[in-house]
Amino acid sequence: MKNKKAIITGGGRGLGKATAIAFAKEGIDVAITGRNEAVLKETVSELETYGVKATYSVFDVGNYEAVKTGIKSIIDTLGTVDILVNNAGIAAFGTFNDMPVEQWSQIMQTNVMGMYYVTKEVLPYLIEKNEGDIINVSSTAGLSGNATTSAYSASKFAVIGLSESLMKEVRKNNIRVCTLTPSTIASDMSIDLGIATKDSEDSVLQPEDFAELIVAGLKLPRRAMLKSAALWSTNP
């Protein structure tokens, strides 16, 4: 995979950062996106220590005009793209009636429309090359709804549907689309939500476990495609 070019949304921290580092260790040039420029700059500096080209673009995936500008800037810098990891996402929990309409809508806008916007801008480059990989991050919440997770589950169910439809559409273009449904991972978002802690290394999945799965899927021969994968902790 050396010298491949990858774009990772939400790549400044958590799952995105762990994936970016795993890619850099494989010799992949990486572009990360996010909304916090200081965090992105810090991560890019870390990626560069692995001897790869690293860059970033600051934009909200839920803003289509910003996505178009940001992706074009990344492609101009990297020259091309081979791998897209749609990782950016937000979460909030609350009862159906108590969660404000604006918050419910924002979760859908970021998690579903954001993935759609970024993929729409990247896909033409992969089709032109007749090769590529798209990894879409859903969740076990996209497989089963629970009380207080209606917005997040709805968004992650939608990610699965969109991803599987796209997979069947672009197989003819030698583009592999993989949907990942991890259970709780000790990411920054999970820690902020209080569903994981920083000292839970022995009981909860870590971002590095997630990144290892992505790399393993990408290393499959081109004739093989990891359609979907659910990553769970061995500790119930």
Image (tube, rainbow, N blue to C red):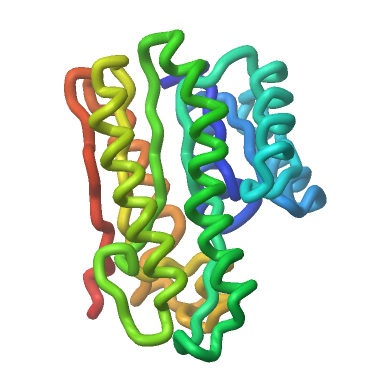
Q: Is residue 102 left or right of residue 88?
A: right
Q: Is residue 60 above or below residue 25?
A: below
In the rendered image, residue 41, in percent from the top left (x then y), is placed at: 77, 43
Identified at 57% across, 56% down, the residue is 110
In the rendered image, residue 25, in percent from the top left (x then y), is placed at: 50, 33
**Which residue is most to the right?**
38
Identified at 45% across, 57% down, the residue is 207
Quadrant for residue 185, please give it: bottom left
Question: Which quadrant is the N terminus positioned in?
Answer: top left
**Which residue is most to the top?**
129
Q: Is residue 233 above or below residue 226?
A: below
In the rendered image, residue 5, in percent from the top left (x then y), is placed at: 53, 22
In the rendered image, residue 94, in percent from the top left (x then y), is placed at: 50, 86
Quadrant for residue 164, please give it: top left
Identified at 42% across, 72% down, the residue is 201
Q: Is residue 16 left or right of residue 45?
A: left
Q: Is residue 131 above or below residue 193?
A: above
Identified at 35% across, 86% down, the residue is 147
Q: How many callouts does the rendering have?
A: 0
Q: Is residue 114 left or right of residue 215?
A: right
> Which of these two is toward me, 8 or 100?
100
Q: Is residue 59 left or right of residue 111?
A: right
Question: Which quadrant is the C terminus positioned in?
Answer: bottom left
**Which residue is most to the left?**
224
> Which of these two is toward me, 179 or 218?
179
> Which of these two is toward me, 147 or 197?
147
